[in-house]
Image: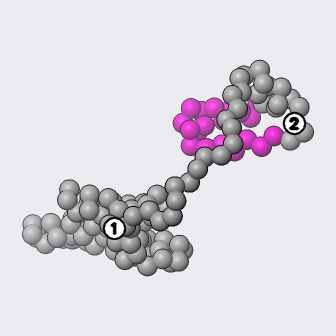
């Protein structure tokens, strides 16, 4: 628990997937160590596979983000925000269902980007009917 909290307490949003793969790697290495303690070859092999694949994936993700793994894991620890707080500008506009229908009917092209929620709700079929 303490190691998981320590690793995630200082991580920003963009770095969180790397931390998830690092923690996954740790779980594999813990399984490997448990296999050695129990003299269980299956736990040793599977733990080594999970641990090494998590470590490799973490490395690949850090290379893709052009960051070092140490900077991802320890870079935000005990740092304060830099610069002034961002101010909110502009106004929010309330739109009801009727206004949305009018805007969609008046549009020449509409792009609907399906996401995970659409698939979970099984709404892709109703979306295709539109």
Residue pointed to by mark 2: 107
Work out whether 111 lies above or below 98: below
Q: Position of residue 34 (x, y in %)?
A: 15, 66
Can you say which quadrant of the picture contains the C terminus?
Answer: top right
The residue segment tinted magenta is: 110-129
Q: Residue at x 71, y 23 (%)?
A: 96
Give the structural element (helix, strand or loop) at label 1: loop
Q: Is residue 36 something that shows in the picture?
A: yes
Question: Residue at the spot x=82%, y=31% of the render?
Answer: 103
Q: Position of residue 102 (x, y in %)?
A: 83, 26
Q: Quadrant of residue 107?
A: top right
Return the residue nearer the eye: 71 or 87: 87
- Dot 2 alpha-carbon crowd within 10 angstroms: few under 14, some 14 to 19, many 20 or more: few
User: Which residue is painted at 28% across and 73% down in the image?
Assistant: 48
* Left or right: where 52 falls relative to 45: right
Residue 70: x %, y % from top left: 37, 77
User: Within the magenta stretch, is there residue 22?
Assistant: no
Taking the magenta stretch, the answer to whether it contains residue 118 is: yes
Q: For the residues carrying marks 2 and 1, which lies nearer the camera in this image?
A: 1
> Circles 2 and 1: CB distance less than 8 Å?
no
74, 48: nearer the viewer: 74
Secondary structure at badge 2 equals loop
Task: Read off the residue under disc 1.
Answer: 77
Q: CA distance from mark 2 to mark 1?
A: 48 Å
Q: Nearer the viewer, residue 45 or 117?
A: 117
């Amino acid at each position: 628990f303490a190691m998981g909290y320590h690793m995630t307490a200082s991580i920003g949003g963009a770095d969180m997937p790397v931390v998830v793969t690092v923690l996954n790697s740790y779980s594999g290495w813990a399984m490997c160590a448990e296999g050695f303690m129990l003299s269980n070859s299956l736990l040793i092999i599977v733990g080594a596979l999970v641990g090494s694949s998590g470590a490799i994936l973490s490395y690949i993700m850090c290379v893709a983000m052009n960051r070092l793994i140490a900077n991802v894991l320890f870079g935000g620890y005990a740092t304060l925000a830099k610069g002034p707080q961002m101010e909110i500008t502009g106004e929010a506009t309330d739109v009801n269902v009727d206004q949305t229908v009018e805007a969609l009917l008046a549009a020449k092209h509409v792009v609907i980007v399906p996401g995970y929620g659409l698939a979970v709700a099984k709404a892709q079929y109703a979306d295709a009917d539109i």
